[in-house]
Amino acid sequence: MIGILRNGDYRSSTALCMDDGAPRLSPRLERACATIENPGLPRGEPEQVSEFLPTLFVALVTALVVVSASTGWVDSTLADGSVKNNSRWAHLAAAYEHIASQPGVDVIIIGSSRLYSGIDGSCLDAKTNHSGTSHWNLAVRGDFPYMRLPETDVLVRANAQIVVIEAGPNTFSPGIGTRKNRLRWEVESLSMEFDGDESWWPLVRAEDEVYLATSIIDRYRISQSFTPESSDELAHRFLLLGDSRAMEWRDGMMPDQPGSPEWISALKDPPRNDEVNLSSEEMAEYIEVLTASTFWQASSADHHNRRSLEHIIESLESNGTKVILYAPAVHPDFLDAIPAGFWDEFNMSRESLTVDGRPYVDDTFESWNQSSFTDPVHFTESGRERLCKEMGRAIDSSLHKVV
Amino acid sequence: MGFDFTNPQYYLWFLPVTLILVFALSKRKRSRQIGILCAMSYIFFMLASGWHVLLLLTSTLVDWSAGNRIHRIGEQRLKKRWLKLSLVTNLTLLGVFKYLDLIIETLGWWSLQVGGTLPFNPPGLLLPVGISFYTFQTMSYTIDIYRGKNTPADTFIDFACYAAFFPQLVAGPIVRFDYFREQINAPLEQSVGRFRLGLSLIVYGLVKKLVFADNFAFHVNSIFVDGAPLDNIILVYWGAFLFGLQIYCDFSAYTDIAIGSGHLFGIRLPENFKGPYGAASPAEFWRRWHVSLSTWLRDYLYISLGGNRHGVRRMYIALMTTMVLGGLWHGASWNFVLWGFLHGLLLIAHRNISGKKWNIRFAETRPRLHHISALLVTQWFIFLTWLVFRVEETAMMLRSLKTFIFIDVRLDPTEAFDSLPGLQWLMIILALGFCIVHCTSTINGGRLKYAVARLPNIRWGLVMGLGIASIWLLRPQEAVEFIYFRF
């Protein structure tokens, strides 16, 4: 740096250039000043347009290549759970594809965190009387039928013999969540292909269509929305020389690559966080929240979730897939706490869906042991064992008819 | 989204249409080119600020008439009267649309203190975009004519184009008329080299704004909120540091895009920032930060108040008045007044210290150490004043300032990390990256962006491509308005 001392004030060359009264020290400084004040044009003769256009082309191609390459990076950090702790969304398409490619009889179980925590597919495999039957737990935390709509086609194409769909009181809530919930669609859009002509598309609200990619531009746009987080992950690994932050959580993840042995076990018996038993105060507080929540107030009206559920059932049944509806049990304290008539509309909804001999196993009002639950609605190891027994029985009796 | 330089519409149709109209349809016809630029500038302003375009027109008409009269009339008394008309009109526009709410709120507060209430409320007028910039610009026109430093514009359109030229209309730089006139004296011409320079500056500015400033805003906005642990020294220093970077990237980005847009039309606009965080004294900071405003304040306010011609005491008064009013120029809030006052104090303190024998001896014997110490001390104070600029709520501001000067502080890295909204690692990389680039650029006289523009063809294409990709990939989902857009 060129500098000068004047009145004890050490001044850089830039400062001098700005001070008209400052003495010019050297030709070098003069040149530096001239450059700042009159930064002007590139050196040499003006370029020709014919020389300039290829450079614009280089700029555009570079931008496209970098953006495309970053999509791969973003997708991988989404899929391995480094960016969003529910990387299951990123893996669902691969999971359905894997199931479709498997020989033998397949049973797919879909639903919310209740079945995610409650179903052990390996247990069901062992319990069934039909050898060669695989049970796949593809439940997703925070699930409700409207959010499941975009998976309809891949679910049908999986060609499972039986699909068990969770249909408890929460399933019939008219609530369809907020922008935050649509994150799942955005993540799924990066691994599933939509074109806007799907049979379920008319059921999607116009304002929600933006969360589903129907073109490459949409995919880039959605991928871009995760780029800052993916870059943050890259920076984290770079600065701390660390591993993926996916190691920080387990619940909701499918941590292993499709096709690996761990991948199959994750599809059957997904990884879960360690069980934490709630204290009686925490349990009471939780129950209070649930009984006040609209998410647990079923409605028998013709709402988005109801229409979506019916569409998924219809799509599966028209493909020859047997559908079993299942309402899991709840904690006995929760059952005691609900006000009279709280789930009347759930009962009405259930009745209307029990047509043409479609099995509907309803454990909602069954009194299960407290030790089956970690909280009012999620299952412990012993709860999983009981669920395995109950559901295994229902699946087996249906398998008799379809296999 | 308002119509500004981050709005895609500006690049998708506004710039291309204006370029075609100016160069393809009006080739070498100077008056037509200036007329089109003027018309498009008014369209730009209407898209950005709606009916407020009438205020711009008022200011333009008054200053055009005043300038012509001042130039033609021989009698000093009448000249002064026309100058007063120009100043009163512009300052009234500023006063009503920018400061009326603050004045009424302050009066209301004082009324409450003495047990009364005001019979009216602040009108809540929407601040017209760029009013602080174009009023200062047109005032400088009439003052220069009054001082005999300049002659009026040849035509009204030339002057209207100067007042409304869209690249610098809403957030500067504040251009003097003689500078602008030099650019439009001849028909506007374009060359490939100049066009490339313009594009380089636009991309450079967009990277600074969308990748750096807007991401830094994400953290800054979550730090200075109610309930944040502002006694945690890490959090406050991180917030002050990032806000300093945010405001520089935000404002200098606007200038870069403005200069770049100007080059597309063959018009050069002056630099407004010259590596301010490389300044080793408060005086140097003001020669590097918002140069067009600080020179305006120097030429039209500080010198008018006597400058340094009437002894040290008068100089200090002039300096402090200039800085307080300069602070108030930034917005209708007492924070900005305090910010200006603190900078006034810093300038006075620096004037005192730089003449002391021990300081001169230190600088002579250990010039490098002296420079580094001066740089660190200056920047520490600069970042302290950013807290006053940013944190509006008084209790929060006082708490932040106490923490910044190490009073009643806690050091809790975990709490600081948990208080941030995410993207911490990305933010560290961006801040580090910015510091390295800013230091390199400052050491080289602020020429990095011009060095980029001069790269050989293929390398230029690669750098531009990377810039465009980073804008696309790293811009936050929520658009953040330019900070100086409403000043």
Image: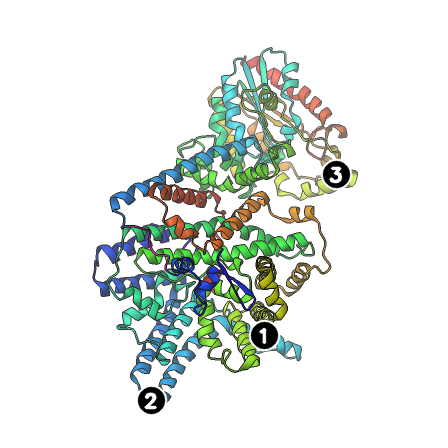
Residue matched to label 2 = B75
Question: Is A78 or B484 nearer to us in this picture?
Answer: B484
Most extreme residue toward the right is A280
Work out whether residue A16 or residue A126 is closer to the camera in this orientation and state it: A16
* Image mark 2: chain: B
Q: Are marks 2 and 3 on the same chain?
A: no
Residue at x 47% of width, y 38% of height: A223
Q: Name the residue under label 3.
A: A283
Q: Do labels 1 and 3 share a chain?
A: no
Give me the chain letter of mark 3: A
Q: Please report the bounds of the magenta region as a residue range.
A: A38-44
The image's mark for residue B257 is: none
The answer to whether residue B202 is seen in the rendering is no
Residue type at mark 2: give it. Answer: Glu
Q: Do labels 2 and 1 share a chain?
A: yes
* Left-right relation of A299 to B403: left
Rounded to the nearest angstrom, the CA distance separating label 2 from label 1 is: 41 Å
Based on the picture, tell me whether residue A134 belongs to the magenta stretch: no
Q: Quadrant of the C terminus of chain A?
A: top right
